Image: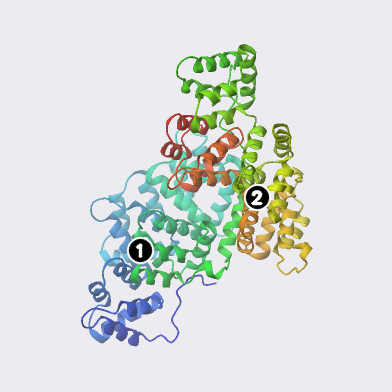
């Protein structure tokens, strides 16, 4: 199935098009609208024929005339479209290695993503256009393991056999583990050989096997074991093996997000993928970033340049609401990966040689007399487990006849006080307090209700109910019922029961559940869409729900989260999406919330504090891993950049390290 956005123009006439372009550039000024309309609606093969016809009719070089008439980014885009794909790639690489410095990102993008045949064509085009050997030029401009991997990719020798040996898959996964995580130092040659030579199908299975035996995705090991441009190249290879469309969707997003636009990257990808997989890239982009590629281009560019890019994009998925197979495959792969059992690890462990009375004395000394020794308080509180903190509370009372919580509250202030006092509560007491704050007073903080209720297990929910009743002499269910309404209230009340099934998946039932979720034709008001989702998402076990979501994708070619966003709105939508993301990958859910709490102007310290406290002994180590995978920066680095003072110091101790 053709997945490009640009197709052969019906009724194509090369001479007629050549004449139209000549007229558009004749005389004073040029008709840019006519040029972009014509060139973006012809396939590359047809554009090459137009160039030949132009030379025959007028004895002039069309590309030279376009360069003369057009300027800036628009000129670069239009001229790139006129070159055959291999020659366009050759020009990009020549520009990347010419002059002072090297554009390593361009080299990585092209050589990590092209097929064997595309690389052979590129090498031949480079030789023809510049009368130079591409391999020799790259060797002369790069170094180390980065150079070695580029040379391997230039050989276009990746295996293309779809027949996969299970034994070799297991051996390669084991060899990669032994070459990195299990070795003092890293055997880079092993990474180069396996990732540079094995077939795509084989490597996808190797990555799955690696996750099982290492307990972490191959990308995380590459980040830990390799560095610099070599690390970036190997990560790009892995991403392209998993999904070329997802790789390019991410590259396009990064080219446009934030201040400024990386126009060279944007042009290169929009041109090179317009006749290959632009429809897949568009849909993965829409699914991953909750925004259409079309709209992001529209907001980030201007003038004829924007119009030409939008024509290459080929449509607005926010308007169309369609869902294509590539996005479904990406979603399905993510579900499969999430089903692999990974050990959850906190960052705060019980202190060795723990002495509750000694810690109580340190804390008393830190708060006695004039001033407060915040560093001593942070050192004790953040480096003890919650169970040990409860013992310190008792020891402090027994030794001094004073309430440690009251003393801390009087001595500390601001964000640090909230963090330290939160750490001194039991997990259930802390969650109960956060829920109480979310429902008391004017207005309701629905995001806090959703975060806590959608992510806690049965045992945690029951403990929260007890702590809530003890602290506020009211039931949590009653407060949730009185402060919310409609389907949202029903979702929260269902979750507050703590009665989610804890059994394994049932394949037959999962198929029936997926059918129930996919059914949009039911007219029975007692069986509304929201009721059906509630009866399944709020009651089935996590392993079972993962199977339901897989069945849903197979049945509809839709990801269940995409379906929820399309068919629901408001707090109901947000609650169901939170449940789905929690089932899929709870550490990734919290990584996303942490990132959003710190990105942009200002910091949502309440969310940051709440998650750092509540996950520090459960899965904060895993959250750190997901954070760097998702956002290409460490949680430690972002906390350090976004917070300050003793609050920052305490958060960094809880974070547990720099990735």
Crowd rating for badge 1 (residues with CA inside 10 Å; few <14, some 14–19, many 20+):
many
Q: Position of residue 210 (x, y in %)?
A: 57, 44
Q: Position of residue 150 (x, y in %)?
A: 38, 52
Gap in Å between the C-alphas at discs 2 and 1? Answer: 44 Å
Q: Is residue 167 visible?
A: no
Q: Residue furthest top?
A: 399
The percent position of residue 442, horizontal first and vertical second, equals 60, 46
Q: Report the colour scheme.
A: rainbow
Q: Measured along the vertical axis of the image, is residue 346 above or below residue 280?
A: above
Q: How many marks?
A: 2
Regarding mark 1 in the picture, which secondary structure is present there? Answer: helix
- The circle on residue 155 is none
As displayed, is residue 611 above or below residue 487? above
- 78 and 119: which is toward the camera: 78
User: Where is 69 relative to 251, above or below?
Assistant: below
**Which quarter shows the N terminus?**
bottom right
531 on left or right of 207:
right
Residue furthest to the front in view is: 442
| Residue drawn at the location 38% of the way across and 43% of the way down | 228
Please state if 5 lies on the left or on the right of 620 as rendered: left
In which quadrant of the rendered view does residue 275 lie? bottom left
In the picture, the disc for residue 579 is 2
Q: Percent x, y for residue 44? A: 39, 74
Q: Which residue is mark 1?
A: 89
First in sequence: mark 2 or mark 1?
1
521 and 111: which is toward the camera: 521
Horizontal arrangement in the rendering, residue 636 relative to residue 462 (left or right)? left
Contact between labelled residues 1 and 2, with CB atoms less than 8 Å apart: no
């Amino acid at each position: 199935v053709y997945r490009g956005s640009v197709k052969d123009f019906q009724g194509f006439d090369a001479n007629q098009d050549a004449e139209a372009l000549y007229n558009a550039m004749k005389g004073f000024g040029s008709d840019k609208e006519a040029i972009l309309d014509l060139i973006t609606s012809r396939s590359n093969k047809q554009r090459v024929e137009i160039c030949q016809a132009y030379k025959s009719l007028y004895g002039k070089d069309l590309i030279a005339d376009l360069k003369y008439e057009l300027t800036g980014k628009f000129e670069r885009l239009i001229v790139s479209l006129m070159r055959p794909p291999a020659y366009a790639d050759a020009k990009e690489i020549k520009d990347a290695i010419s002059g002072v410095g090297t554009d390593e990102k361009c080299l990585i993008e092209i050589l990590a993503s092209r097929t064997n045949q595309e690389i052979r064509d590129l090498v031949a085009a480079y030789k023809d256009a510049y009368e130079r050997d591409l391999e020799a030029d790259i060797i002369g401009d790069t170094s180390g393991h980065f150079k070695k991997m580029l040379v391997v990719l230039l050989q276009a020798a990746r295996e293309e056999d779809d027949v996969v040996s299970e034994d070799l898959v297991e051996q390669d996964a084991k060899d990669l583990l032994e070459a990195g995580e299990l070795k003092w130092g890293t055997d880079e040659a092993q990474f180069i050989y396996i990732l540079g030579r094995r077939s795509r199908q084989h490597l996808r299975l190797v990555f799955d096997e690696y996750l099982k035996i290492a307990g972490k995705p191959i990308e995380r090991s590459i980040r830990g074991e390799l560095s610099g441009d070599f690390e970036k190249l190997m990560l790009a290879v892995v991403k392209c093996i998993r999904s070329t469309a997802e790789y390019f969707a991410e590259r396009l997003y990064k080219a446009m997000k934030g201040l400024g636009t990386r126009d060279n990257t944007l042009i290169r990808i929009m041109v090179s993928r317009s006749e290959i997989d632009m429809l897949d890239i568009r849909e993965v982009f829409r699914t991953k970033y909750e925004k259409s590629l079309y709209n992001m281009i529209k907001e980030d560019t201007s003038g004829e340049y924007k119009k030409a890019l939008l024509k290459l994009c080929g449509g607005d998925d926010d308007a169309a609401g369609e869902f294509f197979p590539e996005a479904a495959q990406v979603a399905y792969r993510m579900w499969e990966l999430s089903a692999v059992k990974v050990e959850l690890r906190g960052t705060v462990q019980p202190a060795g040689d723990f002495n509750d009375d000694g810690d109580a004395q340190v804390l008393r000394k830190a708060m006695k007399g004039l001033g407060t020794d915040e560093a001593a308080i942070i050192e004790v509180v953040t480096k003890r487990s919650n169970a040990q903190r409860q013992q310190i509370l008792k020891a402090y009372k027994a030794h001094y006849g004073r309430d440690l919580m009251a003393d801390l509250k009087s001595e500390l202030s601001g964000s640090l006080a909230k963090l330290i006092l939160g750490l001194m509560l039991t997990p259930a007491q802390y969650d109960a307090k956060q829920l109480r704050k979310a429902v008391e007073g004017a207005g309701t903080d629905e995001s806090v209700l959703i975060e806590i209720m959608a992510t806690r297990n049965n045992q945690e929910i029951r403990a929260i109910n007890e702590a809530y009743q003890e602290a506020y002499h009211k039931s949590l269910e009653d407060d949730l019922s009185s402060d919310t309404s409609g389907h949202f209230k029903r979702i929260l009340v269902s979750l507050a029961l703590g009665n989610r099934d804890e059994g394994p998946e049932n394949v037959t039932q999962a198929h029936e559940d997926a059918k129930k979720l996919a059914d949009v034709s039911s007219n029975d008001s007692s069986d509304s869409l929201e009721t059906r989702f509630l009866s399944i998402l709020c009651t089935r076990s996590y392993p079972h729900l993962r199977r339901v979501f897989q069945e849903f994708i197979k049945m509809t070619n839709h990801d269940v989260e995409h379906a929820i966003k399309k068919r629901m709105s408001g707090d109901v939508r947000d609650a169901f999406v939170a449940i789905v993301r929690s089932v899929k990958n709870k550490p990734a859910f919290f990584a996303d919330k942490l990132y959003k709490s710190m990105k942009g102007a200002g910091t949502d310290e309440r969310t940051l504090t709440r998650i750092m406290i509540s996950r520090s002994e459960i899965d904060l180590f895993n959250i750190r891993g997901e954070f760097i995978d998702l956002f290409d920066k460490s949680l430690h680095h972002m906390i350090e950049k976004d917070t300050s003072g003793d609050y920052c110091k305490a958060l960094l101790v809880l974070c547990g390290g720099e990735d």
